[in-house]
Amino acid sequence: MNVLLIERGEYPGSKNVMGGVLYRKMMEDVIPEFWKEAPLERPIVEQRFMMMDKESAVTVGYKGMEWGQEPYNNFTVLRAKFDQWFAGKAVEQGALLVNETVVLECIVENGKVVGVRTDRPDGDLYADVVVLADGVNSLLAKSLGFHKEFRPDEVALATMEIIKLDKKTIEDRFNLEENQGTTIELFGDATKGILGTGFLYTNKDTLSLGVGSLLSGLIKHKIKPYELLEYVKNHPMIRPYIAGGEPVEYLAHMIPEGGYKSMPKVAGNGVLVVGDAAQLVNAIHREGSNLAMKSGQFAAEAVLLAKERDDYSEATLNHYKTRLMSSFVGQDMKKYKDSTHHFDKFPQYFDKYIPMVNKAASQMFTVDGSSKWEKQKKIWRDVGTAGEKFKLARDAYRAWKVMK
Ligand SMILES: Cc1cc2nc3c(=O)[nH]c(=O)nc-3n(C[C@H](O)[C@H](O)[C@H](O)COP(=O)(O)OP(=O)(O)OC[C@H]3O[C@@H](n4cnc5c(N)ncnc54)[C@H](O)[C@@H]3O)c2cc1C
């Protein structure tokens, strides 16, 4: 097949933003044993989850040496480096990469997408099929009427910094050996209690620190995204990890978080939509790159089938949608279809229960001469009235229901 890859940035990776966790399995399905040559930062051997209050945090996590050995579980990457290498692999296989070129619109003839109009002189290009992989906003899918303007409660805005720090200092601070990495997901006070998350990931000689919230939350609380990042950087639970580090890059990007209910039409006559453009992000598990890769792979399979049949109609290309929705991608999108909306509607999970868990932990672990029975009773009393206890039980049940 003749494949043309169009990128508006100076090079692939120049416009892409990611906290940085790349999942081994989906990448390996595309390029076996990629870790032997890809520019990766660190294999992750530890994943922590920090539920933060203003001056405390309850942390849970898992560290396993099996993740530090081949074939590994996942890795941190810096997209500016990784994407260049990845696109290079496509070029090695015969794809033609054209950078610094913006696709302005799809060319539609007789109800079928037949190519794209670019911002280059004589920039119309014709193709049997166009795969739209233009990211979260997907103006191209929108112009085809595949989706409407997204609402502020369907999209998160994240800001992040890459902070330079000596390699040895990173390993000491995070209790790591060489070629081992840690990810820490941050909840609660990281976003000042509004729905969203933060992250702190270890790279070779930098840290990636970021925070993101639904646009609706930022608007409602009148918080600017960079204020949240400054807040996290100065938080007493985070400050010591980044102390002495020098910010070398500042990035901001949107994340599609509307889930299954926000997915656009993904196949039409002569056109397919993949990755963030198809809203394929599992916000609960911070997965996006792997869903993008898998959807790209399914799209390629559908195109091969269409070529075999010499039929690029929606009917044949819909094979992509069938494959996508029956795979883990579609299944996970359905599983969490109500989760973002639920946590957005009921902010108490973030602004009330996380501080409550912190307070309970502090009481339980402070040795002050009272018995553990007394402590448990006090913690239970502090939950509040019978009505508030009922609400807590109801919210726990609701959370289980939207996540089960
Ligand atoms: C702060 C942050 C942290 C994240 N952390 C993680 C993580 O740890 N793990 C994970 O798996 N996912 C993570 N994600 C999600 C992940 O980054 C995305 O799901 C993934 O990048 C989607 O890939 P994509 O190719 O569909 O879109 P993008 O990576 O957005 O790529 C779209 C590309 O299309 C180009 N483009 C757009 N419009 C045009 C046009 N008109 N013409 C030409 N080119 C165009 C852009 O320049 C860009 O290169 C994170 C996202 C953010 C913002």
Image (spheres, helix red, strand yellow):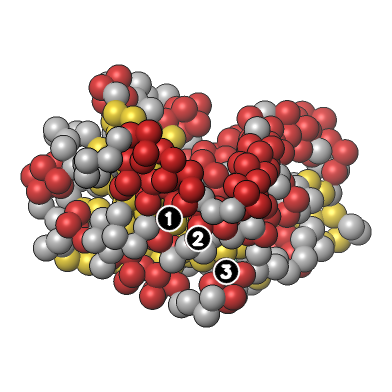
242 on left or right of 224:
left
Q: Please report contact status of discs 1 and 2: CB closer than 8 Å, yes or no.
A: yes
Q: Nearer the viewer, residue 258 or 328?
A: 258
> Mark 1 vs ligand 1: CB under 8 Å?
no
Residue 248 occupies quadrant = bottom left
> Mark 2 vs ligand 1: CB under 8 Å?
no
Q: Position of residue 179 (x, y in %)?
A: 19, 34
Q: Please report contact status of discs 2 and 3: CB closer than 8 Å, yes or no.
A: no
On screen, 294 above or below 136? above
Q: Amino acid at mark 1?
A: Pro
96 on left or right of 317:
left
**First along the sequence among labels 2 and 3:** 3
The residue carrying mark 1 is 355
Residue 48 occupies quadrant = top left
| Crowd band around label 1 with a 10 angstrom C-alpha radius: few (<14), some (14–19), many (20+) | many
373 on left or right of 25:
left
Q: Nearer the viewer, residue 257 or 77?
A: 257
Q: Nearer the viewer, residue 345 or 34?
A: 345
Q: Which residue lies at the image location 57% right of the left edge and 40% below the top edge?
A: 291
Quarter holding the C terminus? top right
Q: Amino acid at mark 3?
A: Gly
Q: Position of residue 105 (x, y in %)?
A: 70, 67
The residue carrying mark 2 is 351
Q: Amino acid at mark 2?
A: Asp
Which secondary structure lies at badge 3? helix
Observer able to see residue 342? yes
The residue carrying mark 3 is 217
